[in-house]
Image (tube, grey):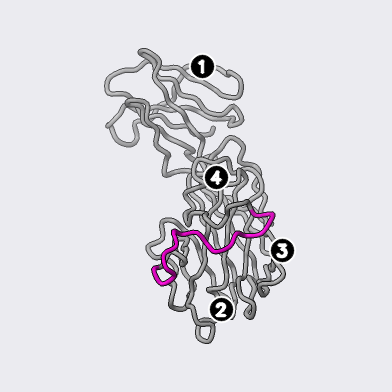
Amino acid sequence: MKRKAGKELSKLLCAGFFLGASVQASPGAAYFLFSNTNLITLNTWNPLPNTAPYPSSINVAGLAGLVVTRATVTLQGLTHQSPSDVALLLVGPQNQRALLMAEVGGQDARYSNVTNLTLIFDDNATQTLPVFSNLTSGTFKPTDGWLDPYFGDPGGVLPYDFPFPAPLGSSNSVSALSVFQNADPTGTWNLFALDDSSVYSGYISNGWELSLSVAVPLQITQSLTNVVVSWPASVTNCQLQSSPAFLGANTWSNVVTTPVSIADRVYVTNSISGEGALYRLVTN
């Protein structure tokens, strides 16, 4: 397993806008890439589980005090005689789960086989995976083809659960990586792969990658005539900055109020003035 950093944590981590105590994440959030490049075999239906390893795991460490703002997944080298037989479930460290693909890529194995595809799953993609035509390499939204009216539109619940150790009730998992937003990324992420065919098989030759954009969960509240900004104490070597609201870029200045540590959080209290202020946290 490998981990690579995108934007370093020396960059902007999180920003918030105080006006009625609302917070928005900064587009400058840091991102990290984790990978497990081991082969995943996709065997025929029986016995279950019929893939190896099951699950394929990635351990995320070194992001203490941060939360996920965006997650994407990349499959490296999908080859299969009938990709509509393949279902993929991603389970996060706190048991959040997202169905990445099921019943997609053509429903006729005579014409739909694929070789060495790279598939990127991204909620921000412009297209879903095709249900009745061949898969090609590219970037797609997570897709549950079982929702298609061709299958009777049975409410999005797959006709089977992923077998143990996948979580119970995995058949009704949502097809969206947004389920991981604001979650602690630390821990084991598991990719469960299943092949629901009794005939066809395949593999993912170079495993999978997990890309995480992360940010400090900056919290902003109002206390009488003050604004209270806090963040996890595990995030160190940081500087809180502020900018008067609506004045645009390049107006940031360091907040000189001494932070106070209480339990597992750091708090800074400032007086409210004018229309409020933007707050952001950067590392020194």
Q: Is residue 23 above or below residue 138?
A: above
The amino acid beneath tag 1 is Thr
Inter-mark Cα distance, 2 to 4? 41 Å
Asked if marks 4 and 1 touch (Cβ < 8 Å), the reply is no
Asked if marks 2 and 1 touch (Cβ < 8 Å), the reply is no
Of the two numbered discs 2 and 4 on the same chain, state the one appearing first in sequence.
4
Q: Is label 4 or label 3 in front?
A: 3
Q: Is residue 39 visible?
A: no
Q: Tell me the quadrant of the picture where the N terminus can be found.
A: bottom right
Of the two numbered discs 4 and 1 on the same chain, state the one appearing first in sequence.
4
Taking the spot 60% from the left edge, 48% from the top edge, the residue there is: 92
Taking the spot 58% from the left edge, 19% from the top edge, the residue there is: 261
Inter-mark Cα distance, 2 to 1? 61 Å
Q: Is residue 281 visible?
A: yes
**Disc 3 target residue:** 53
Q: Residues within 10 Å of mark 3 (few under 14, many from 20)?
A: some
Inter-mark Cα distance, 2 to 3? 20 Å
**Disc 4 target residue:** 8
